[in-house]
Amino acid sequence: MNDRRIPLSDIRKELEHYLSMETAFSDGRVLGSMCTAPHPLAVEAHRMFIESNLGNPGLYPGSVEMEGRVMEMLAKLLNGPGCSGLMVGGGTEANITALWVAKKLQKKREVIFSSNAHFSIKKAIDLLNLDGVEVGLDDRYRISIDEVEDAVTDETLAMVGVAGTTELGMIDPIDRLSDLAAENYFLHVDGAFGGFVIPFLRQIREGVPKFDLSLKGVNSISLDPHKMGLSTIPSGALMLRDMEYLEGISVDSPYLTSSRNMSLAGTRCSAAVASTYAVMRHLGNEGYIEVVRRCMAITDRLAEGIEELGREHDIEVAIKPVLNIVAARIPDHVAVKEELERKGWYLSVSRHPEALRLVVMPHITMERAEELLSDLETVLNARR
Ligand code: 0PR
């Protein structure tokens, strides 16, 4: 640390410098992230509650009430009347907490998950000293139910399904997992990405499968307001079928304003809760439907554009998009990605299958999508 104070104006300049190094979503050129520009109201709410800490609830009853109301809204969204849960820092914390809760319910060790599960599941298994049983995928890049059936043993504690996979946005057959898990195994659904898409998409599109608490075997669902929920980072949520699950992980917290603490984090970001509360109340079901409708229209256009390019070039959509992620199979896809990055795009790749991955978040516009397709054509022409 410097010995002497530095004037505010100098520090502000330094901050401006660092900010200028960051990538802004507002440019509409980031298709490699699952986050987006938060709604302006979310930012406003975040600033208002910057001092509050849900980790010490007696001092912040407003935060406690807002968390409860967010949980009520989410319970309704996930078809779990009377269910509740807690706000956390994001998908990783939600997944760790879910498996921690599961571990406390039964003295078994094995967690079945697939190769398309987010890496936070592996972190959770390692931290909790559980045994991971990794199974493969079906022909649509979803968890293989046959392999899950074969993987079940006397030691099976939990199964993890993904509703909106990180790489391709696929939805695992949660109904089948729910039947398999029934009352015997804990079923956690990772809806970090899909949780704020699927419930809205189901209202406007046929054939989008169920993944929620209406499936009786589902015990918990993670869903991130800081991804498709348009809230600020760090906003995560873990919905539980039964709040009693938290008893197992609760500890005495005698010097705080509540006598029991029931979350992985101690200090908890009320600002993110306020942000989530504000944006969910403001947009409501109709607002999120519009967000999802727009993202899906752009997703469909990108998929269609890629197929059009496929008439002239060796390129195709790896699988028909289910949510707002498009994967394009292209020879040398990493090199193509790098060439597009030199043209100002921020993209990513998937491994299963190996493809160029485009995540169509709310900051992407149709105009930008057309520009991207045109730049992709230029790159493909130059590589011929
Ligand atoms: N579960 C799923 C299905 C996810 O996609 C992610 C994150 C998580 C859990 C973990 O969530 P947190 O990152 O909130 O803990 N998926 C993105 C990924 O790893 C996260 C991300 C977001 C990465 C923005 C990059 C980025 O720019 O790819």
Image (cartoon, rainbow, N blue to C red):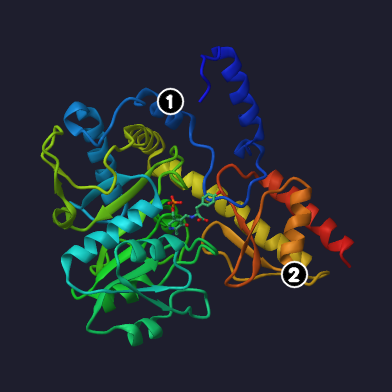
Nearest the viewer among 113 and 317 is 113
Q: Is residue 215 above or below residue 22?
A: below
**Residue 38 at x, y = what percent?**
49, 36
Residue 211 in sight here = no
Q: In the figure, is residue 90 to the left or right of 35? A: left
Nearest the viewer among 335 and 328 is 335
The amino acid on which the numbered mark 1 sits, given as a three-letter code, is Glu
Q: In the figure, is residue 37 to the left or right of 373? A: left
Splitting the image into 4 quarters, where does residue 12 fall?
Answer: top right
**Residue 280 at x, y = what percent?**
37, 39
Which residue in the protein does label 1 denote?
A: 44
Identified at 18% across, 54% down, the residue is 249
Q: Helix, strand or loop at disc 2? A: loop
Which residue in the protein does label 2 denote?
A: 315
Identified at 43% across, 39% down, the residue is 231
Splitting the image into 4 quarters, where does residue 110 fall?
Answer: bottom left
Quadrant location, the C terminus: bottom right
The amino acid on which the numbered mark 2 sits, given as a three-letter code, is Ile
Ligand 1 under 8 Å from disc 1 Cβ: no
In the rendered structure, are the residues bearing label 2 and label 1 in contact, judged by CB atoms less than 8 Å apart? no
